[in-house]
Image (cartoon, helix red, strand yellow):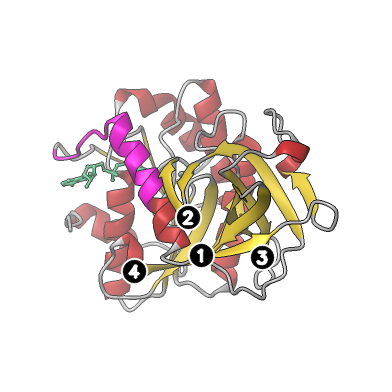
Amino acid sequence: MISLNTALIKELSLLPSRPKIMVIGETDTGKSTVVKTLAHWFQEQSQKVAVVDSDIGQSDIGPPGFVSYGILTQSTTSPQSITNKGSYLVGKTSPYGRELSVVTGTKVCVEAAQRSEADAILIDTCGLVKPAGGVQIKCAKAEMVKPDLVLALNTPGLTPLVNCLNSLGFHVRNFLPSKKVKTKLAKIRKENRISRWNAYMGDSPSLFSVHHSRAVIRRWWDESRYVDIDQIPHGTVAAIQDPQTPGFQIPCIWTISEGDPFVLAPLPKNCKLGTIWITAYKLELNGTTVTSA
Ligand SMILES: Nc1ncnc2c1ncn2[C@@H]1O[C@H](COP(=O)(O)OP(=O)(O)O)[C@@H](O)[C@H]1O
Ligand SMILES: [Mg+2]
């Protein structure tokens, strides 16, 4: 666990009660590590901490392709110690072309974290911060969430975004990324996505038979990439409405077994599926284990 410097601790102590803190930076600048460190710090102050994970490609809380939020439950801050409380479907591991659903999911998760009476809400973000599209998605997130503090892991590429956020009136505090931050190769990123999906599904997810004639199957937000509703391929990311948390979706995987369609999800066997949302985010499966994501 890295330690927070004195200037930052002072800054945190001056924040209003129940602060929202958004961490921004380019890819591999240590954003998620800073979020974990902050989570630990707030927990040490006996605060109930919520983390909103809006990095849909390198998720720490729910599976990739979803914006998720969770509440810290143990004294350690490994991802496993954050209980996933809700996920919002995006259906892609890159925010390009899905900016609106990423921003919507972030807002929905922050509002749910506020309703859960979290004392501090930490918002992790993706590394898309430039050019204009990156600035826009982060400004939109900030406008929707209204963070009390934006922690910027500043690199030259972040300057236009930081300038915009400052001009919008946000309180941005700049930090240089740690020299110890390690770059994650594409292969490692892919392995992280696979392990996040398998961790989410657990050891024995349930297989729900899907009868096309009875189930309501819809493209998520009218998914623009090609996805044939009548021939949904093996290993497609899907979701159902979350009955416990209206407005959230439970991540599922659409699969084909012996020619018949099923949905795979870590849910009780008697669970009703309702509408099944389909995306064009494809996975590869070996049985119920995700092997490519
Ligand atoms: N201060 C630090 N000391 C040592 N390792 C770090 C530090 N910050 C980040 N890392 C490591 O660098 C890698 C990238 O950090 P991460 O927080 O995942 O970056 P980001 O979320 O910006 O992509 C991870 O393997 C992480 O463990
Ligand atoms: Mg990260």
Q: Are marks 3 and 1 in contact (CB under 8 Å)?
A: no
Helix, strand or loop: magenta stretch: helix
| Label 3, ligand 2: CB separation under 8 Å | no
Q: Residue furthest left?
A: 180
Residue type of the residue flagged with mark 4: Ser
Q: Is residue 63 above or below residue 28?
A: below
Q: Could you give the CA–CA distance between mark 2 and mark 1, rounded to whole angstroms?
A: 7 Å
Residue type of the residue flagged with mark 3: Asp
Q: Which residue is mark 4?
A: 81
- Residue 205: image tag: 1
Q: In terms of depth relative to the viewer, which is nearer, 4 or 203?
A: 203
Q: Which residue is mark 2?
A: 288
* Magenta residues (range): 180-195
Q: Secondary structure at mark 1?
A: loop
How far from the left and from the top, in percent, is residue 243?
A: 69, 70
How far from the left and from the top, in percent, is residue 228?
A: 74, 34
Q: Are marks 2 and 1 in contact (CB under 8 Å)?
A: yes
Q: Identify the residue shown where x is 34% and y is 38%.
A: 189
User: Which image quadrant: the N terminus?
Assistant: bottom left
How many other residues sit within 10 Å of disc 2, few (<14), some (14-19) or many (≥20)? many
Q: Secondary structure at mark 2?
A: loop
Q: Is residue 213 above or below residue 168?
A: below
How many other residues sit within 10 Å of disc 3, few (<14), some (14-19) or many (≥20)? some
Q: Identify the residue shown where x is 65% and y is 41%.
A: 279
Q: Residue furthest bottom?
A: 46
Does the rendering let one see residue 51?
Answer: no
> With 97 as the anchor, is 64 left or right in this view?
left
Q: Earlier in the sequence, mark 2 or mark 3?
A: 3
